[in-house]
Image (cartoon, grey):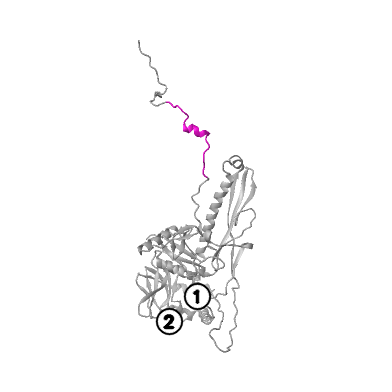
Amino acid sequence: MTDAVVSNPAVPQQTSNGQHPQTSLSTAAARNLATTTKSVPQMQEITSRWLLRVLPWVQTQGGAYRVNRRLTHVVGDGRVEFTTEGDAVRVIPTELGEIAQLRGIDDEEVLAALADRFEQREIRSGEHLAQQGAPVDGLHLVAHGRVEQFGEGKFGDRFSLGVLVDGDHFGEELLTESGPVWGHDVIAATPVTVLTLPTAAVAELVERIPALAAHLERYRAGRSAKTNKHGESAIDIAAGHTGEPDLPTTFVDYELAPREYELSVAQTVLRVHTRVADLYNQPMNQMEQQLRLTVQALREQQEDQMVNNREFGLLHNAALNQRIPTRSGPPTPDDLDELISRRRDTRVILAHPKAIAAIGRECSKRGLYPTPTEYDGHHMPAWRGVPILPCNKIPITAAGTTSIMAMRLGEQEQGVVGLHQTGLPDEYEPGLSVRFMGIDEKAVMSYLVSAYFSAAVLVPDALGILEHVEIGR
């Protein structure tokens, strides 16, 4: 008689596949009855947007902001542009008007005649383009490359007078002075492409084109206008006198056509189906989340426009004399010193994160470790106590170069300001409105989301740009 096998209920029995049978509710099934904890929708595009945070915002009624300034005598200190065809480079004739002595020439035939006489030259690195004391041999336009100007000190030592890059020019005194000589050396820091208008060609054109000769003569006569070092119409003041001399009379003249900044707009139409808004609003409001992410994207676009827009973007509205190139390529402490010294009370420096890393590398090379500063509750890298804030909207070119901006801020300081208008209909945030546009035949609700903004530079030295910053070295 065989013995009966008695199973122990406390010991799980194996199934035919060798696994123990389930003895309790699985976690996968239990989750069907559980409430899931969710995050709000996340978004990688959101950045710190320091530019929007640091700018003082000015209420702009009427949608326009007029910047009134003292009358300034424009001297034509812009940069010229070129066209290229293969290896051949030619100056655009109308761009010659950016040279002070040629500003105001409306006859395109005269400008074309000048442009045709420029000769292209390739200069090796280290080669002289001009030597101090030698006669000025022509008007030179830097088409590509970097040249450095050097002067001679009191005791014979050489010091740098600055760097010239693409579009800059030198030797323009040849157009209006008789027998000028170079006051400093000009040496190519890199291989340079330069266009030169020789002295003989200038003399021949002036003799052959009466309109050109008359224009240059008017320029010579007009240089007697009294201005201060910024080009503004001078205010006559007597000081240090004794007795009872006749005091000068004066007045402050204003620009007759001051610049006006109109508010720009960034807009989109947000669409949400009514069924989604009605049935799927718990635990999060669908409309609220859709709007939150849309507004974030709109603010990112706003900052991008305030940096890069051709009309009012800060990169395109800095004065030429406030644009300085780097001396050697990467952003060295010397470059940062020159950048912040161009204005009083520099409040912030804005740079691409990769440019900030390049600044750190250059400081480390010299054994410098600048002390961070606290700004708006954050510990930020700084130079000379000026916080360096990240702004990824500053572009990096294909050649691996970028720009660094330094600013003075606020109306009271004659600095840079942001422009917006508050009190808009259906305002959601200051300067941003969300307006219901209705429900279409497909039961889709539409909302117009609009942000109105701009930026203004009150005086030229409020904004400075360090250009041609190499970040790959």
Seen in the image, is 293 located left or right of residue 147? right
Q: Secondary structure at mark 2?
A: loop
Residue projecting furthest to the top: 1
Which quarter of the figure is the C terminus placed in?
A: bottom left
The residue type indicated by label 2 comes to Pro
Relative to 33, does residue 81 appear above or below in the rendering?
Answer: below
Which quarter of the figure is the N terminus placed in?
A: top left
Q: Nearer the viewer, residue 37 or 143?
A: 37
Seen in the image, is 428 located left or right of residue 181? right
Disc number placed over residue 343 in the picture, else none: none
Q: Nearer the viewer, residue 202 or 361?
A: 361
Residue 166 visible within the image = no
Q: How many marks?
A: 2
Residue at (39, 62) in percent of width and height: 369
Whether residue 23 is in magenta: the answer is yes
Relative to 266, does residue 329 appear above or below in the rendering?
Answer: below
Whether residue 67 is in magenta: the answer is no
What is the quadrant of residue 419 in the picture? Answer: bottom right
Residue identifier under label 1: 100
Residue at (61, 64) in percent of width and height: 64
Part of the protein shown in magenta: 21-39
What is the quadrant of residue 255 in the picture? Answer: bottom right
The residue type indicated by label 1 comes to Ala
Residue projecting furthest to the bottom: 243
Residue identifier under label 2: 180
Residue at (54, 76) in percent of width and height: 232
Task: Looking at the image, tell me whether mark 2 or mark 1 is earlier in sequence order.
Answer: 1
Q: Position of residue 175 (x, y in %)?
A: 47, 79
Q: Secondary structure at mark 1?
A: helix
